[in-house]
């Protein structure tokens, strides 16, 4: 539980700004200067694979963009939480695309994005069906892109059913990141998440289908691990079905060498037309999701920054620039801009070193926190507080306690401002989304939403805009401690 609100605005603004400036000063401490070599608990060769991949590195998602191309429409499973939609621009969830592409169209689109988005580091095929089931199109796309853009990493997502048939080709094409969705390892539980599978040209249902799927998924993990391919396992948390079981899933995938385990919430809006949505199966609350994630700590390394992207997403995690690069907007001739990507990556390397040192100082400064405090941060990336409250469509959630400051997830909400005017219905939803949060850190906020947040027990702070997130949080924690000491 988060601590009760202790207002710190006004009296300590100047001191808070001074503390944040001190904590955020550039320059590496001895232990932080190794940021470019990676975390102390990670093999340097593994760090080299993940450091620029926004899905495989929590830090990388602050700086780097991914791109999905919708070249694989076929699927061999019908999941109860999936309803693929084409020509759809208003839904942000897996399986949804605005355009289905041929491999040739996809390669042209990737070239256009790479020339205009220097943050791009990864190309992924995540459907809208299954990348391994529709392997011919996936492979042709990867081959065309790898020839023109050798610095872009290749990545694919699969349900795992057809994956063992293509491991040799995946390794040969230097695809070193594969995501496998595993929602259960107990077939009795797995059967509740799917309608059917098609394997070896035969349709299966029930426990038999779930058993075949489970065995193929675990076989995929073993084969990929043995070939040195990094594996991320996705699991959809479905309350009342697999929520308690995901701890067992976490243990099982860790034992098979999975690099990351991403436990993500079920999306079950009836408007999406999924089986779960139409039958009333609810998704988890943010608190329930965090509870399951926390229960898995100590097992497989957890991913907490997933945005459950569309199958045609473009940009940083949490943003979608796909509409800017529809086929009708692409230039006839595309010239690559590798120099811009190289320059951006050089800038990120320096920024990472400075931020690592600042974050280390911030952790030390927060060491005296006796309880747990939750912060909601408005950010557009780069690890800084650089977004107006009214424009935020999601909040990054950080936790501060005696063990330091850490990212624990994100919470989505429609942005408060529409055409410069606040929407009170949206504000009410934002208040619900921020349940348990004590402070909102943003670049700027209007007086009315500030007051509304205060009435809900949440203090908005906008005098630390453009600061590193961790140093700003440490400054607030220190000011809070000073205020408490004065009152004692």
Image (cartoon, helix red, strand yellow):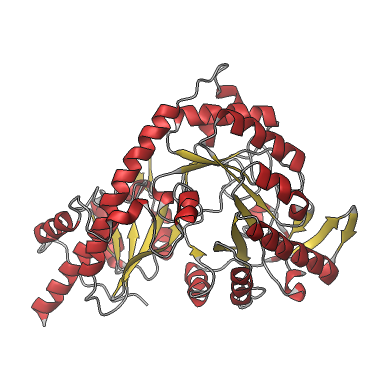
On screen, residue 371 versus residue 305, left or right, reads left
Q: Position of residue 388 (x, y in %)?
A: 31, 47
On screen, residue 340 versus residue 157, left or right, reads left
Tell me the quarter of the picture where residue 145 sits. Answer: top right
Residue ID at (82%, 71%): 207
Q: 38 or 287: nearer the eye?
A: 38
Residue ID at (83%, 65%): 209
Quarter of the image that includes the C terminus? bottom left
Q: Position of residue 71 (x, y in %)?
A: 69, 38
> In this picture, is 249 found above or below 141?
below
Report whether residue 326 is seen. no
On screen, residue 76 versus residue 322, left or right, reads right
Report whether residue 290 is seen. yes
Q: 244 or 357: nearer the eye?
A: 357
Q: Position of residue 167 (x, y in %)?
A: 72, 51
Quarter of the image that includes the N terminus? bottom left
Residue ID at (45%, 59%): 411
Q: 22 or 457: nearer the eye?
A: 22
Q: Pick out the residue farthest to the bottom.
A: 488
> In this picture, is 486 found above or below 212?
below
Q: Position of residue 361 (x, y in %)?
A: 22, 63
Total label count?
Answer: 0
Q: Pick out the residue farthest to the right.
A: 202
Tell me the quarter of the picture where residue 332 sits. Answer: top right
Tell me the quarter of the picture where residue 219 sits. Answer: bottom right
């Amino acid at each position: 539980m988060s601590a009760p609100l202790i207002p710190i605005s006004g009296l300590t603004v100047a001191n808070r700004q001074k503390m944040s400036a001190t904590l955020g000063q550039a320059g590496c401490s001895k232990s932080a200067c190794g940021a470019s070599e990676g975390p102390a608990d990670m093999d340097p060769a593994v760090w080299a694979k993940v450091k620029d991949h926004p899905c495989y590195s929590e830090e990388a998602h602050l700086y780097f963009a991914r791109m999905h191309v919708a070249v694989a429409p076929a699927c061999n499973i019908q999941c109860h939480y999936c309803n693929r939609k084409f020509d759809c621009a208003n839904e942000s969830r897996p399986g949804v695309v605005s355009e289905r592409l041929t491999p040739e169209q996809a390669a042209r689109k990737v070239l256009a994005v790479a020339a205009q988005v220097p943050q791009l580091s990864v190309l992924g095929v995540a459907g809208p069906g299954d990348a391994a089931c529709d392997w011919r199109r996936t492979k042709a796309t990867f081959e065309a892109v790898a020839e023109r853009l050798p610095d872009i990493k290749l990545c694919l997502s699969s349900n795992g059913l057809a994956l063992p048939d293509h491991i040799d080709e995946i390794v040969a094409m230097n695809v070193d990141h594969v995501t496998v969705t595993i929602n259960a390892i107990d077939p009795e539980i797995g059967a509740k998440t799917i309608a059917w599978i098609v394997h070896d040209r035969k349709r299966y249902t029930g426990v038999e289908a779930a058993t075949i799927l489970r065995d193929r998924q675990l076989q995929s993990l073993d084969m990929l691990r043995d070939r040195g391919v990094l594996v991320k396992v996705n699991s959809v948390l479905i309350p009342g079905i697999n929520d308690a079981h995901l701890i067992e899933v976490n243990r099982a995938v860790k034992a098979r060498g999975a690099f990351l385990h991403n436990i993500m919430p079920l999306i079950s809006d009836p408007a999406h037309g999924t089986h779960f949505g139409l039958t009333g199966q609810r998704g988890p609350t943010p608190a329930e999701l965090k509870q399951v994630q926390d229960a898995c700590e100590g097992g497989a390394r957890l991913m907490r920054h997933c945005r459950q992207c569309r199958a045609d997403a473009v940009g940083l995690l949490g943003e979608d620039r796909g509409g800017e690069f529809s086929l009708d907007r692409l230039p006839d001739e595309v010239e690559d801009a590798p120099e811009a990507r190289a320059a951006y990556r050089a800038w990120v390397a320096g920024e990472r070193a400075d931020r690592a040192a600042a974050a280390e100082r911030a952790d030390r400064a927060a060491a005296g926190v006796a309880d747990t405090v939750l912060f909601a941060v408005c950010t557009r990336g780069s690890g800084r507080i650089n977004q107006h409250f009214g424009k935020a469509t999601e909040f990054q959630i950080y936790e501060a306690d005696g063990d330091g400051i850490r990212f624990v997830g994100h919470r989505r909400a429609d942005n408060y401002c529409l055409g410069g005017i606040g929407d009170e219905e949206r504000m009410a939803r934002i208040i619900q989304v921020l349940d348990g949060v004590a402070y909102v850190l943003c670049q700027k906020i209007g007086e009315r939403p500030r007051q509304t947040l205060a009435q809900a027990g949440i203090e908005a702070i906008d005098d630390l805009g453009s600061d590193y997130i961790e140093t700003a949080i440490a400054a607030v924690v220190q000011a809070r401690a000073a205020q408490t000491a004065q009152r004692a």
